[in-house]
């Protein structure tokens, strides 16, 4: 058995020696971590969606406009038929185009 496993009959007790009663009298030094931090509040700048600016905006119209732009870009990327052929347009023969479309469809079903 080690010495650490033995009970302590005389535990160390502080506060009885010279200058130990008042802990603040030990040292006048203090850590920077003891100082108060974050004592100032930041206010919103005029360009940071202040309440006056937010009241005047029409968020629904802005959202619908952004959705329209994204939908228009997606249809432009895919083409008029839905996009399976765009993925396979770099191939040369009709047979390889069909194989590419089938593998794309298989991958779509796999990811669902």
Image (cartoon, grey):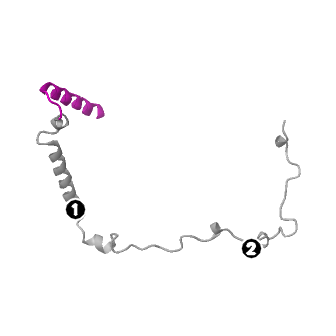
Q: Quadrant of the C terminus?
A: top left
Q: Judge by depth and name the residue closer to the eye, 33 or 58.
A: 33
Q: Is residue 65 left or right of 29 when viewed as pictured?
A: left
Q: Secondary structure at mark 2?
A: loop
Q: Is residue 9 left or right of residue 59?
A: right
Image: 88 above or below 68:
above
Q: Main secondary structure of the magenta part?
A: helix
Q: Earlier in the sequence, mark 1 or mark 2?
A: 2
Q: Which residue is mark 2?
A: 28
Q: Quadrant of residue 33?
A: bottom right
User: Magenta segment: does it hold 87?
Assistant: no
Q: Residues within 10 Å of mark 1 (few under 14, many from 20)?
A: few
Residue at image mark 1: 62
Q: Quadrant of residue 22?
A: bottom right
Question: In the rendered image, which quarter contains the N terminus?
Answer: top right
Write the start and end of the magenta stretch as one range.
90-112
Name above or below for residue 92 compared with residue 2: above
Residue 64 locus on image (x, y percent): 20, 57
15 sits to left or right of 51: right
């Amino acid at each position: 058995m080690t010495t650490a496993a033995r009970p302590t009959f005389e535990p160390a007790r502080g506060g009885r020696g010279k200058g130990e009663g008042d802990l603040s009298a030990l040292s006048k030094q203090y850590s920077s971590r003891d100082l108060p931090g974050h004592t100032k509040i930041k206010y919103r700048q005029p360009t940071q969606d202040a309440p006056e600016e937010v009241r005047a905006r029409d968020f629904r119209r802005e959202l619908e406009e952004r959705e329209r732009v994204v939908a228009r870009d997606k249809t432009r990327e895919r083409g008029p038929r839905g996009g399976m052929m765009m993925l396979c347009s770099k191939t040369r023969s009709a047979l390889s185009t069909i194989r590419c479309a089938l593998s794309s469809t298989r991958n779509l079903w796999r990811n669902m």
